[in-house]
Image (cartoon, coloured by chain):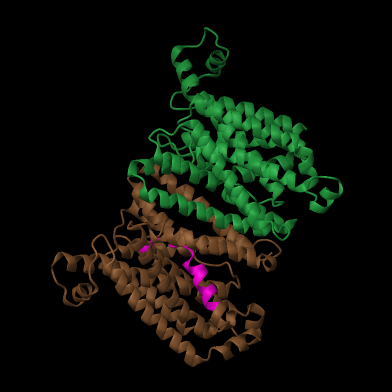
Amino acid sequence: MVVIESARRNTPATRIFAFGLFALLLALLSLWSLTIGTTAIPLGDALRAIISEGTSHQDVVISTIRLPRVLTAIIVGSTLGVAGALMQAVTNNPLASPDLLGISAGAAFAVVISIVFFDAQSPLVFLWFAFGGAAVAGILVYMVASTGVSGVTPVKLALSGAVLSVFLGSVSASLLIFDMKAIDIIRLWSVGSLTGKDMAAVAAVAPFALAGVAATLLLAREVSTLSLGADVAQAVGQNVLLWRLVSGALMVLMAGSSVALAGPIGFVGLVVPHIVRLSLGTDYRWILPFCAISGALLVVMADGLQRSLTGIDVPVGVTLALVGAPFFIWLARLRAGGIG
Amino acid sequence: MRSVLILSGFSVVILFLALAIGDHHVSIAQILAVLTDSPAADAQSIQIIRDIRLPRVILGFLVGASLATAGMIAQSVLRNPLAEPGLIGVNAGAALAAVIVIVRFEVPPTHLLSWLAFAGALTMSLAIYALSWNSGSSSLRIILIGIGLSSLAGAGANFISTFGNPQAVQRAMVWLSGSIYNSTWDKIRTLATWLTIGIAGSALIAREMDLLILGDETARARGQPVELIRAVMFVLCAVLSGAAVAAAGLVAFVGLIAPHIARALVGHSHGLMLPVTALAGGLLVVGADLAARTLFTPAPLPVGLMTAILGAPFFAYLMWRKKNA
């Protein structure tokens, strides 16, 4: 009933209008974000720098520092938003997201390994390690959580994810023993950050991230069916196992590429789908595109606001955790009744 | 009871091994000579044992005992066998406070570090209590809230390290990884004081803990001031966690494993569990540290890594065992 009511309240036309509004807002915020930094650059100059590829100091700052930063924020935000929605749908679990289930931590740990032991430098290498780490972490967490009579419950998944994150945290810290220089690498990859990305990195990772997002959007019908639970999905003729495997692969693709680009940014994948679902009901053909655009909005906004308010470059992962952790606590209090 | 004797015997063996093994091996006869202050001890052994290994072993033991007892209290008060101060944010609160001190001071004063770590752990316990107790106690909810608070404190620590100078942040990170390599008698005295308070307090309310674990209703019917006891337990947990974190950083999973060992050996009575838990915890950390510094010589690993390697599979085992229970 809730679905029908909310659908009546916001018709497809209003939804498309809202989506357009969000897109406009994202464009405006991104432009604003280009103007903030150690030196304020007027919007006109910033736009000219993008279009004309000038060589003045301002032009170089815009095209090599700020533009990649904003693009990274957009790509990572939309990818994480969609990945979180997909995970919550497939696992029937309001507390699922790449960071909570330890998948981001696994991917980031794999990237650290690639740097410390294999001297990796290119984002493409990071990418494949991140895919591997995300896949292994996902499988491990799911296996541990699925033991026991009650099967996979949200709490067991979250607990297993937290334990994996603690464990990987200890192991990464121990890498310092082998290589003291690794401290900066570990710091960089333990918290998601948008700093120091160049256009080459963005260009290398973007195709994978966007492919993951696009594929998920195309499969939105199947995701909606999956979100009804295995029994219902089977009853309406869906090959549940097949679509779960496909979803798992997409999740690894999205979580891995966002980590390879910006490190483990938390809470976007948790918060965004919840807010979107509150206003859109349960149809993933609407939820997924809105998650993509809202995720991008959230990350661009968090980064821009933080920089303009404090004037210091705090990693965006920290900012988002400071906002997102209270949200998670609120959610846990709200939902705890039904998720034993 | 026989199992307790075996555990005690095992402890003596581990403690002697931890004193004997290292870059330079010391014979049992020499160790005994140093410990009894006899003239047979040679100068080199005296220096190695008295200045390096003995403080390290004692500090490791005390850290383990504190973490284990804190874990036992947390598991009782939250009525959840998976509750571990490291997982539910109590240790993270202590660590956040300690990171502030370490980033702020060149040489962090031991006492200040302990007090602030205690304040951090207590704030976190109170936050868990306040956030989770408004409508009856769902122990799963507490753990989830703890995970949320834990990442909040972690983000706080990261936020602070963005502003600190790189060297200070590096010190804080190495310290956070959980190690007891720079043990001093000063640290031992401070930790011993806090541990004594924590253990004595726990011993005093051991019977009340037995009662409380049966449920609020039952405990109240037997005339127990439930809220008071629970508050005392939270404070004791914070005392022990804070002290351990201040001394050694984040050593994970000891608070999870040790109480389970104790329960397997002596059953569920807290009066009996308390000494066995503390002993098992101490032993775990000393043993893990021994393994950490000898297995990969000359690259000593932090003890926190060894306990994590032991603890993460143990956690999986606990989940698996629930299937058979």
Look at the image and say whether residue A175 sits in the magenta stretch.
Answer: no
Please tell me in which quadrant of the rendered image residue A178 appears: top left
Question: As drawn, is A64 to the left or to the right of B70?
Answer: left
**Depicted B164 relative to depicted A308: above or below:** above
Question: As drawn, is A316 to the left or to the right of A247?
Answer: left
Using the rendered image of the protein, determine whether residue A335 is visible from the camera's viewpoint.
Answer: yes
Query: What's the magenta bit mostly, secondary-structure-wise?
Result: helix
In the image, the segment drawn in magenta is: A262-277
> How many discs mark residues in the rendered view?
0
Can you give x and y, in whole percent of width and height, for residue B68 in the image? 63, 39
Look at the image and say whether residue A271 sits in the magenta stretch.
Answer: yes
Quadrant of the snapshot with the C terminus of chain A: bottom right
Kindly indicate which chain is depicted in green in the rendered structure. B
Kindly indicate which chain is depicted in brown in the rendered structure. A
**Depicted B103 relative to depicted A113: above or below:** above
Quadrant of the snapshot with the N terminus of chain A: bottom right
Can you give x and y, in whole percent of width and height, for residue B208 in the image? 78, 41
Residue drawn at (42%, 54%) of the image: A190
Q: A273 or A326, which is in the foreground? A: A326
Please tell me in which quadrant of the rendered image residue B134 appears: bottom right
Residue drawn at (73%, 29%) of the image: B5
